[in-house]
Amino acid sequence: MTARTQEALVAAQFGAQAGAYLTSAVHAQGDDLAALAALAEGQAGARTLDLGCGGGHVAYAVAPHVAEVVACDLSPQMLAVVAAAARERGLANLRTVEGPAERLPFADAGFDLVLSRYSAHHWRDFAAGLREAARVLRPGGRAGFVDVVSVGGAAADTFLQAIELLRDTSHVRDRTRAEWEAALDDAGLLVQTVTPFRVRLDFASWVARMCTPPAQVAAIRALQDAMADSVRRHFAVEPDGSFMIDVALFVAARAG
């Protein structure tokens, strides 16, 4: 039997759904995306990396503000969708490169900005991915990471990780703010600001986007119904299964 790596699992999960992520309302808009993209404003000469680009929404948002955007992802199917969308949008300064977060195919200190959104919870090695982000960032450059964060205590954390994994088997972990800050510091990235957000997920589109099997959809709904009231309140679970998640933007700089 052929061994299945985390990278292969991520590529398989998301490659098949590349078009869905391009058109996903959650990924194509939102206050967190606007805040992340705002880091590129006023940096017309910047070379920017969209790390774990997925459907490319960060890259599309920052391309008008910078000299070049490199959209990097594990999935060649995702990258093909991003390249086609960039051509359709007239973004001639956007190019795509295939590669894992833990082994970026770029030279040291080659980027002025490194941005990443909803990617880090899929990384096989979170610490290594952050070290690579710091390595390819120039001294004095800035990095911005948006991801789901775990903030609701042990029971809520167990619930969050469980439904994430049931919905998408390439999920690794949603980390806490403290875990993020410690890992960024260890990677040589100095945290400047942390901005929290709450994002509503429409249940039907959330599972459809990943083509979650019916048995796993049923398991998620069963968990939602079975959890303590405090957990259900934290995630604001609605009758149809739609719910709220906690998200944070971590902005950091490389010393130098």
Image (tube, grey):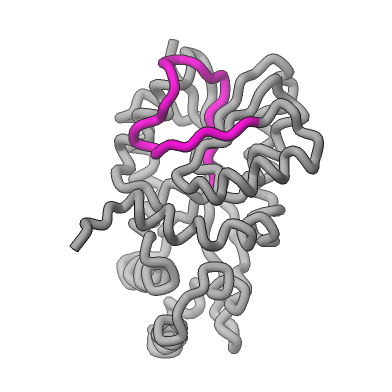
Residue at 49% of width from left, 29% of height from top?
Answer: 252
Total of numbered circles in the picture?
A: 0
Measured from the top left, where is residue 92 in percent x and y? 75, 28
User: Is 100 inside the magenta-drawn segment?
Assistant: yes
Measured from the top left, where is residue 131 in percent x and y? 34, 29
Task: Point out the image quarter for the N terminus.
Answer: bottom left
Q: Residue furthest top?
A: 256
Quarter-of-image position of residue 115: top right
Residue at 52% of width from left, 36% of height from top?
Answer: 72
Measured from the top left, where is residue 48 in percent x and y? 60, 26
Where is 239 relative to 89, above or below?
Answer: below
Residue 40 visible somewhere in the drawing: yes
Residue 193 visible somewhere in the drawing: no
Q: Please provide the residue range marked out in magenta.
A: 95-117
Residue at 64% of width from left, 44% of height from top?
Answer: 82
Q: Residue furthest left?
A: 1
Measured from the top left, where is residue 116 in percent x and y? 53, 40
Where is 195 relative to 227, above or below?
Answer: above
Where is 158 relative to 150, above or below?
Answer: below
User: Is 76 inside the magenta-drawn segment?
Assistant: no
Quarter-of-image position of residue 168: bottom left
Task: Point out the image quarter for the C terminus.
Answer: top left
Residue at 34% of width from left, 57% of height from top?
Answer: 172
